Image: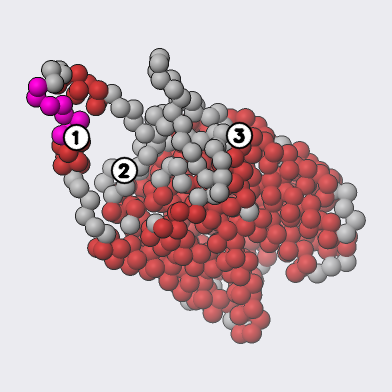
Amino acid sequence: MGGAVVDEGPTGVKAPDGGWGWAVLLGCFVITGFSYAFPKAVSVFFKELMQEFGIGYSDTAWISSILLAMLYGTGPLCSVCVNRFGCRPVMLVGGLFASLGMVAASFCQSIIQVYLTTGVITGLGLALNFQPSLIMLNRYFSKRRPMANGLAAAGSPVFLCALSPLGQLLQDHYGWRGGFLILGGLLLNCCVCAALMRPLVAVVQPGSGLPRSSRRLLDLSVFRDRGFVLYAVAASVMVLGLFVPPVFVVSYAKDLRVPDTKAAFLLTVLGFIDIFARPAAGFVAGLGKVRPYSVYLFSFSMFFNGLADLAGSTAGDYGGLVVFCIFFGISYGMVGALQFEVLMAIVGTHKFSSAIGLVLLMEAVAVLIGPPSGGKLLDVTHVYKYVFILAGAEVLTSSLILLLGNFFCIRKKPKEPQPEVAAADEEKLHKPPADSGVDLREVEHFLKAEPEKNGEVVHTPETSV
């Protein structure tokens, strides 16, 4: 199903783990911030949109839903584009789309037009930036990759804290049309981030050809990997409940007769904790003794998040909700920092571009079902406690799926030959006959001269299932 890729990780190039990789990390930080924070930050314009078009809150909420659906649901399309054209060109086009959508939305005369411009066009543009930026980060970092993923993931809470007040300021001074126009110009910074994504180039030795491997436009063979299937199922179940508490916690506080300003401050507490939790989780996951067990650390973070939801359901006053937001922020940051690091460890470098697209597509369905199902339960029961219990049960279930599935698949996996045995077999395979007259030192030199693969993680049973 496909042709050769233009900008793939070239064989024989070692991930630099620094150098220009820090510029790539900065670009990924900005892209992650825009991708995850923008659908939430645009909600500050909803009140003016309701007055402009004479619609209700549920109608305006579809803008954020469509943005998130495009970000997740176009994963396979992004994978095909990256495998065909490369990361940098796809991101440049995505930056233009993201900006064009917001600029066009500032001239819209109906809410349907806003859906198409802000939701579909801008959402597609953000998707075409988000996925390639993670792929480039994976190519530039290997040993330091968990820390790099944690720092890049911190872009989400940082930009959320910045874009929401900025959006309110723009609305107060220029109205929603002027605010959309300025935000469209701001999204052109995605093109600047795309320019930072310089492809790694293999060093060609004299007399040798450029190392190159073929790759399908969308590699469905990842479904043969039990580790990937377990991850995809667990992540989809997790997303059903992961985003529910942040959506309802402010309304929960208002239901407890907390003033509006104090209720809104709960999200600030959650975001502030999240900013520090993500880099910290990435640093811990990168420790030598912890990294081989990153799948279990990810499972623990989901379990921790589910317990926080269940504990939050018992909150009876504002202080209890503040404590909930602190612990939810820690667990939420851990999940955000580890989710793509674990996926990279499971499938490896060369299949990551296809794997992330397929996972995001599966999560897209859960993203659309999760918050509305919580709202439906609230409409029936009028009790916020049940919404938090449902979310916690879903996240806890996902952690158990990943933990138990990973544990039992490890037990069933056939034993792999030890590295020393494999090296001895390879040496015997290349060893010349005794009467050939070949110098054994030359053979040893030839074997040691093989180039190291680019950023490939050595798959241990703990990380690859």
Residue at 47% across, 50% down: 340
Q: For the residues marked 3 and 1, what is the alpha-carbon distance in whole angstroms?
A: 42 Å
Instruction: Identify the residue under disc 2.
Output: 458
Name which of mark 3 and mark 2 comes first in the sequence: 3
Residue at 51% across, 35% down: 8
Mark 3–mark 1 contact, CB under 8 Å?
no
Q: How is the image coloured?
A: secondary structure
Q: Residue 98 versus residue 328: which sits nearer the camera?
A: 98
Tell me, for residue 312, which label it has, or none.
none
Q: Residue 213 versus residue 270: which sits nearer the camera?
A: 213
Tell me, for residue 429, which label it has, or none.
1
Secondary structure of residue under mark 3:
helix
Instruction: Identify the residue under disc 3.
Output: 88
* Residue extent of the magenta highlight: 427-435
Quarter of the figure that contains the C terminus: bottom left
Secondary structure of residue under mark 2:
loop
Q: Mark 3 is on which residue type? A: Arg
